[in-house]
Every structure is written in C-alpha cells, then in structure tokens.
Amino acid sequence: MDQPSPSVYRTKSWKTRQRTLVMLGVLVLVLIGYLIGRWQDEPDPVAAATPAPSAPVSPSASPSPSESVSPSPSLSPTEYAVLQAESASELAGIDKQDTSDEGGGQNVGWINRDDHLRFDNFDFGAVPATKVAIRVASGAGTTGRLQVRLDSRDSDPVGELSISNTGDWQAWRTDTAVLTPVTGVHTVFITFSSDEDAEFVSLNWLKFQH
C-alpha cells in the first residue's frame, strides 16, 4: 500500500490551522461586539452626575409686595350703652321713682310677676353679647326671676337671673346673667316671674357685655 506523501500531511495541517484561526477570529469579533454593546448600554457617569436644568420660573409666580394678600380685618366688638330702666320704650305694670343709687336719676320699681320692659331696635353688633349686668335692689321676703327675651315677650329666654333680697328697696347690687350669644338688631324684652303674686324687685339699669 502506498504511503501519502509529506506534502499531503502539510496541506491537511495547514487547512486545519486555517479553520482554527477563522473560528478564533469569529469568536474574537463576537466578543468585541458584545463588549461594545455593553459599553453603549452603560449610562454616562458625567451625564448622570449633572442635574437637569430646572424650568425657568415666571416672574408672576411669586407675588410682589404690592400684590400680597392683606388679612381680613377682625370684627370689632360693639361697646354697649347702659340701658336705663326708666327710659324703656314700654313699661308694663311698672312705675318710676327717684333713686338713691350712685349716679342719681330714677329707677323703676313695684315690679311683680308678668310685668315687663321693652327696648326697641337694640343693636348687638356682629360680635355676640354673652352676658348682661343688671342693677337690682329688693326688700321683699320673696324671690323671683328676671328673663331676657328677644323680639317677643313670649319667646324663649336667652338669659335669666334669680332675684333675692338685697336688704332694702334702695340697697343696690349688680348681678350678671349669662346669655345665649346674641348678634344683630332685636327688640329686647325684660320679663319677670315669681311663684308669689307680690312685688319683689326694683331695677335701675342693665348693660350687655361680650
């Protein structure tokens, strides 16, 4: 059997090397392409570290001092005048007399249950009145109650005061009744009630308060 010549072996070996080199070249190209792709996918560290420019602020976004909003003014409480009892628009079952109380003038007396006083168009204002000071005197052996009512003598009281003996019909004392808060303009009725049919109080003045 004939032996292949050495040139045949060299030719086969050269072809094998050529195939190997080609495959290595292909692998190298694939690897280089993969690395380039990874590099392109990674964010630019310089771009990532640089903040994006903020949108410009319009000059009208922040008010100028002349455009600043002024706070709404607070309501001022009304300074109520003293209501002299003898100057009421109506005195029902009640008489006037000279008073020995400080300030002089007159008071009303001989007040029994179901009597009343009326003061027309009294303006309480926008800030509520919450109490009323009442100047009273009593020499009676019985007690009674004074009620403050609005707009009708038969309306529910917005305040009430118990009346007791002060020592004499001209021994004056200032008592205070708490009110359901009242605002606006009203007709004010001062009514009186008692368990007994007898005079039980004299009244000089009253003053609403906040």
Image (cartoon, helix red, strand yellow):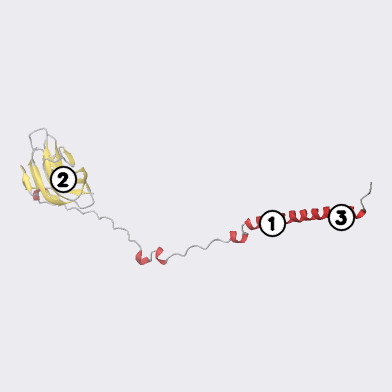
- Closest to the observer, 191 or 106: 191
Chain-order first, disc 1 or disc 3: 3
Residue underneath mark 3: 11
The reply, left or right, for residue 171 in relation to residue 39 is left
Query: Within 10 Å of the Cα at label 1, are there few (<14), some (14-19), or many (20+) other Cα atoms?
Result: few
Pointer 3 or 2: first along the chain: 3
Reply above or below: 161 against 186.
above
Q: Which mark is residue 33?
A: 1
**In the rendered structure, which amino acid carries the disc numbered 1?**
Gly
For disc 2, the neighbor class at 10 Å (few under 14, some 14 to 19, many from 20) is: many
Whole-percent x and y of residue 52? Answer: 53, 61
Where residue 96 appears, x then y in whole percent? 6, 47
Residue 116 image position (x, y, % from top left)? 9, 42
Name the secondary structure under disc 1.
helix
| SS of the residue under disc 3 | helix
Q: Residue at 15% across / 43% down in the picture?
A: 148
Name which quarter of the figure residue 48 lies in. Answer: bottom right
Residue at image position (89%, 54%) is 10
Residue 12 appears anywhere in the view:
yes
Q: Extreme front residue here?
A: 1
The disc labelled 2 sits on which kind of residue?
Arg
| In the foreground, 71 or 210 | 71
Q: Nearer the viewer, mark 1 or mark 2?
A: 1
The reply to whether residue 169 is in sight is no
Residue at the limit of the structure toward the top, as seen here: 195
Q: Is residue 155 left or right of residue 40?
A: left
Mark on residue 135? 2
Cα–Cα gap, marks 1 and 2: 106 Å
- Name which residue lies at 16% across and 45% down: 135
Label 3 and label 2: CA atoms lie apart by 138 Å
Which dot, 3 or 2, sits closer to the camera? 3
Residue type marked 3 = Thr
